[in-house]
Amino acid sequence: MSEPQADALVFFGATGDLAYKKIFPALQAMARRGRLSVPVVGVAKAGWNLEQFRARAKASVEAHGGLDPAAFEELCKRLRYVDGDYGEFGTFEALRRELGDAHRPVHYLAIPPSLFGPVVEQLGKSGCARGARVIVEKPFGRDLPSALALNQTLLNSFDEKNIYRIDHYLGKEPVQNLVYFRFANSFLEPVWNRNHVHSVQITMAEDFGVQGRGAFYEQAGAIRDVVQNHLLQLLANVAMEPPVSATGEAVRDEKVKVLRAVPALKPGDVVRGQFRGYRSEKGVAPDSRVETFAAVKLAVNNWRWQGVPFYIRAGKCLPVTATEVLVRFRRPPALYTVSIAPPNQIRFRISPNVAIALGTMVKAPGETLAGRPAELLAVHNPDSGEMDAYERLLGDAMKGNKTEFAREDYVEEAWRIVEPVLGNATPVEEYEPHTWGPDTTGMIAGDGPWHDPAARSE
């Protein structure tokens, strides 16, 4: 059964960095496509009025994507503003008045996690949660106990069906295409299993450091920042079974099943590293043991994937900025081809550009029966008219489409997997900036080598 369309959008943290960089540009894009037809109420404590709020919105779109005069005028007509403290009941009474006849609002918590509880509690007390949905920005807790506590806080005021845990990564076109490519091409299904797949590697590399966000990174680290969420989501997209339907719950059911089949990590499954110079960053402890690099080895213990290792590697100050998924197939026997050929592979380039490549062997020119590797490559160059992740996910939340939002049980399973290796459960090895981190050859021995996105030009 389809969900009713929301009749208002409220976003808390309306004067903050996320709103400035992402939300206002997404709202202008929605207005450009004719997908924004409801009041948009910003809530913050800045001492501003509506005109100052509109000026902030204009500065935002000018800095991030460009001003579209007609679309921005349409957005401006819908903007409302409530100024007040999140801890004061009067702020939420003012919000209820500003909502007017709207009875199915979407409340977007673009605020620090420490404020989720107080805001959700006030939404419940003021009646603003009645008939409403709530969008919660990651992180969804910082470990399993805090995730359980956050979920309980949300459930005190909202039903699970009305909770939308947003991670912009799930709204990215190439991430969604990974699932579509799998299930829309029948040639993959016969080989997408333990009988033919040798191993899977997922790499998220960044060639920059923490970019002045040392205080934040000290509270996160690579495992919390990207492994527990973004990269386990990519793993689920690679490994999930075909859903029984295209409904959000059917898709989310299959993703949860994947994570349930993944045993919790053990210290021997993890290598953590920290780039030289990290401790000099502002906000970083001089004796910090927080990882800026993590490599982990996981298993998916179900019928399809039993025995296939899944490797995840992520880090900062690496040689390149790129995210790729590499599915490596088993080698063919060395009979007809004289020598053992390298394995075939499928490579999904997620960012900074988009590509799907099939790694094959072809005969090398000459008299001998020798081969050389070649890739069959499809490259997509996004144009300026494509939806960005925030526009897509905001629109989905307004429509009640939960497909690309994390469910309570998914979040808790993801934390269960990484929980044993959080904090200082394993040592941190220092590595030189713009290298591939500490030595991980022992981890991947027999299944390697690690795939190097830096060797790719596309």
Image: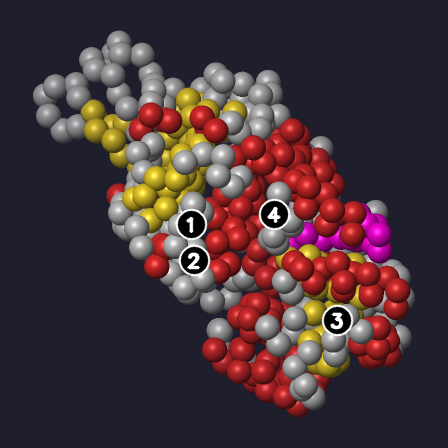
Report which residue position mark 4 lands on. 142
State whether residue 282 is above or below residue 305.
Answer: below
Q: CA distance from mark 4 to mark 2?
A: 18 Å
271 sits left or right of 115 in the view: left
Coloring basis for residues: secondary structure
Number of marks: 4
| N-terminal label among 3 and 4 | 3
The residue under label 1 is which amino acid type? Ser
For the residues carrying marks 4 and 1, which lies nearer the camera in this image?
1
Report which residue position mark 3 lands on. 86
The magenta stretch spans which residues?
154-166
| N-terminal label among 4 and 2 | 4
Mark 2, Cα crowd under 10 Å, few <14 / some 14-19 / many 20+, is some
The residue under label 4 is which amino acid type? Arg
Residue 177 visible within the image: no
| N-terminal label among 4 and 1 | 4
The answer to which quarter of the image holds residue 5 is: bottom right
Q: Secondary structure at mark 2?
A: loop
Name the mark on residue 288. 1
Q: CA distance from mark 1 to mark 3?
A: 33 Å
The spot of residue 215 in percent (x, y) is: 48, 60
For the residues carrying marks 1 and 3, which lies nearer the camera in this image?
1
The spot of residue 396 in percent (x, y) is: 69, 57
The residue under label 3 is which amino acid type? Tyr
Q: CA distance from mark 4 to mark 1?
A: 18 Å
| Image point (38%, 61%), residue name | 281
Mark 3, Cα crowd under 10 Å, few <14 / some 14-19 / many 20+, is many
For the residues carrying marks 2 and 3, which lies nearer the camera in this image?
2
For the residues carrying marks 4 and 2, which lies nearer the camera in this image?
2
